[in-house]
Amino acid sequence: MKHLSIWIAAALASLALVAIAGALPAGEKGLDAKVDEPARTAKAELGKPAPDFELKDLDGKVVKLSDHKGKIVVLEWFNPECPFVVRNYGENGSLRGQAARLAKDGVVWISINSGAEGKQGTGIEKNRKAKTSWKMEHALLLDEKGEVGRRYEAKTTPHMYVIDAKGVLVYRGAIDNAPSGKPEADEKLVNYVDAAIADLKAGKPVAKADTKAYGCSVKY
């Protein structure tokens, strides 16, 4: 009987602890409780909602992707010292004035530098100088931990992504078909970002949704 009484007491104590834990608000259920965060760690996939993120711009202002719901958004992975970026922002480059031109049509452009501190093209002053020199009026965000870059699997600078007005990722890849600076002799220059947005504006699926990005490696 003594052993039975001890067992019953232990069982009642366990039930009491379960009841207390169940009464606690979410996030306060003890050290063993798991935080459900798939939305925060999900990788970007074509045809699926683009993962939300928040980063600071060069002035310390927090910018969230979700701030731009209902609009087409272009993400550009950026490094002001990468020769491919420099060339594309130079005279006749595919990125030169593109963001400002698309902004007139309601498209939001966000540049992201995912380089780690001390790597090529990082630091507020270098990026601010490039932003001024290239007349970039859109947001330029710093992702020094590389968390957003890795979620989007950004591999190069530039690496381009287009998100439609419903928040779905509809294009990823190169800015154009000219890795060497000009297209092949039998081809015309195609700006893939412009083409994707033109398809969206026409109410059509993006014809070329996935291309091979070119440029410098992202300096994680």
Image (cartoon, rainbow, N blue to C red):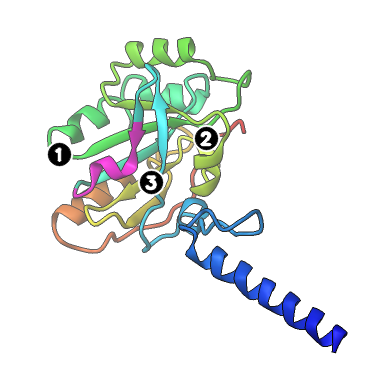
Q: Is residue 214 visible?
A: no
Residue 161 tag number: 3
The part of the chain drawn in magenta is 63-70
The quarter of the rendered structure image containing the C terminus is top right
Amino acid of disc 2: Gly
The quarter of the rendered structure image containing the N terminus is bottom right
Q: CA distance from mark 3 to mark 1?
A: 16 Å
Q: Helix, strand, or loop for circle 1?
A: loop
Which residue is at the front of the view, 130 or 145?
145
- Say whether disc 3 or disc 2 marks the residue closer to the N-terminus: 3
Give the residue displayed 25% in from the left and 63% down from the top: 205
Q: Which quarter of the picture shows residue 194?
A: top left
- For the residue carrying disc 2, how many other residues have a C-alpha within 10 Å: few (<14), some (14-19), or many (20+)? some
Give the residue displayed 66% in from the left and 58% down from the top: 32
Amino acid of disc 3: Tyr
Q: Which residue is mark 1?
A: 106
- Say whether disc 1 or disc 2 marks the residue closer to the N-terminus: 1
- Say whether disc 3 or disc 1 marks the residue closer to the N-terminus: 1
Q: Is residue 67 visible?
A: yes
Q: Helix, strand, or loop for circle 2?
A: loop
Q: Is residue 201 above or below residue 80?
A: below
Q: CA distance from mark 3 to mark 2?
A: 15 Å
Side of 17 relative to 154 (left or right): right
Amino acid of disc 1: Gly
Give the residue displayed 37% in from the left and 25% down from the top: 140
- For the residue carrying disc 1, how many other residues have a C-alpha within 10 Å: few (<14), some (14-19), or many (20+)? few
Q: Helix, strand, or loop for circle 3?
A: strand
Which residue is at the front of the view, 35 or 149?
35
Side of 93 relative to 82 (left or right): left
Q: CA distance from mark 1 to mark 2?
A: 27 Å
Q: Which residue is mark 2?
A: 215
